[in-house]
Amino acid sequence: MERKIVLEEIDPVEIYGVNNKLFDLLASHFPKIRAVARGSEINVVGPDAEADKFEKSINALIAKRMKKRNLTEYDVESLFEDEMRNPEEGEVDLSEDHESIIVYSTEGKPIKARTKNQKKMVAEYYRNDLIFALGPAGSGKTYTAIALAVRALKNREVKRLILTRPAVEAGERLGFLPGDLKDKLDPYLQPLYDALEDMIPAKKLQSFMEEGIIQIAPLAYMRGRTLDRAFVILDEAQNTSLGQLKMFLTRMGCDAKFIVTGDATQIDLPDKRNSGLVRGVNICRNIKGVSIVEFGKEDIVRHPLVTKIVTAFEKEKEEN
């Protein structure tokens, strides 16, 4: 049977790729049909069942393109990953549920936005190059940011992934910790390591870090750098001064993505008034290309007690 698929309101090159590279890759997964792209029309010849699957794949790519700046070969291949197949029929599952998956864990489990504001954060990522994600502990701000960063790295949307946070003690003295500077700083960066280890196999992660593709460093190490084609996450930003936050934001280079996460209720600075997060957010609030996502207690995805603890501390603060 023969059918015609028409691409409407989208530049065909954005779906086909340069020199039809993405289109040819997609067609290679359907050996039982012959698909020819001419301008905005695709002529498909072959069994109806296969043609249906091919058309669904085209529609899935269009949906992906609506959410991101450009498509890559990874976007095509992701339609045919084993995890996305119906185990009984072997068909590609193009359901909305799979579209919500950000990345897969090292155990093969899907990592996806689970709450309203996590989903908002993912949506804003495709629309803006700088995101401020603010909210309480356990709301998934950093984990969602790192998942987006790992996917961007796998999609080759960026060349490197940089995670940073200020080295500010939460009731401890940095100078009294044992070891050299790296040993002293590692405890503060450990939450970032933990998230990465969930999403990238240990050997691969070690290789990426040795090659400088993934870098984890204290905020002070960002000074003087220009970060092109990088996905950069500043965690625990409530512990930065306004000057430090400005320094970080002005590191942004071409084709870079920046996410700043923080919780204004957990400032560890000696003088909490020195925190630049809230002031920095207000300064940037009306700049085009900047998004602010505010998480709440309803986004907390840790143990149920965490929500109750956060509520109790907020109540105590209000009473005092």
Image (cartoon, rainbow, N blue to C red):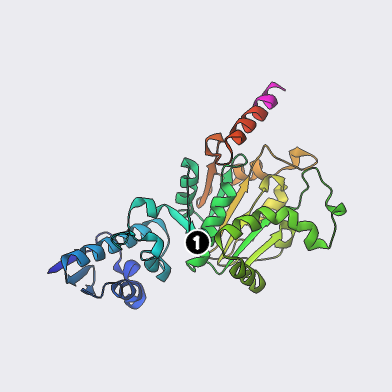
**Looking at this view, is 308 or 254 the one in front?**
308
Q: Is residue 105 left or right of residue 94?
A: right
Taking the view exactly as shown, the residue that stands out farthest to the left is 1
Q: Within the image, what quadrant is residue 134 found in? A: top right
Mark 1 surroundings within 10 Å by alpha-carbon count, few (fewer than 14), some (14 through 19), many (20 or more): some
- The answer to whether residue 283 is above or below residue 258 is above
Res. 229 visible in picture: yes
**What is the x, y in percent for residue 252?**
60, 61
Taking the view exactly as shown, the residue that stands out farthest to the bottom is 19
**What is the x, y in percent for residue 145?**
55, 53
Question: Which residue occupies 55% across, 67% down?
Answer: 229
**What is the x, y in percent for residue 3?**
15, 67
Taking the view exactly as shown, the residue that stands out farthest to the top is 319
**Looking at this view, is 206 or 12 the one in front?**
206
Residue type indicated by callout 1: Arg
Label 1 sits on a secondary structure element that is helix
* Quadrant of the frame with the C terminus: top right
Q: Is residue 114 left or right of residue 284?
A: left
Q: Within the image, what quadrant is residue 232 found in? A: bottom right
Question: Which residue occupies 68% across, 66% down?
Answer: 225
On whether residue 123 falls in the magenta region, the answer is no
Q: Which residues fall within the magenta stretch?
A: 315-320
Res. 286 visible in picture: no
**What is the x, y in percent for residue 70?**
41, 65
**Residue highlighted by disc 1:** 151
**Looking at this view, is 70 or 109 the one in front?**
109
- The answer to whether residue 136 is above or below residue 25 is above
- The answer to whether residue 275 is above or below residue 98 is above
* Quadrant of the frame with the N terminus: bottom left
**Magenta region's main secondary structure?**
helix
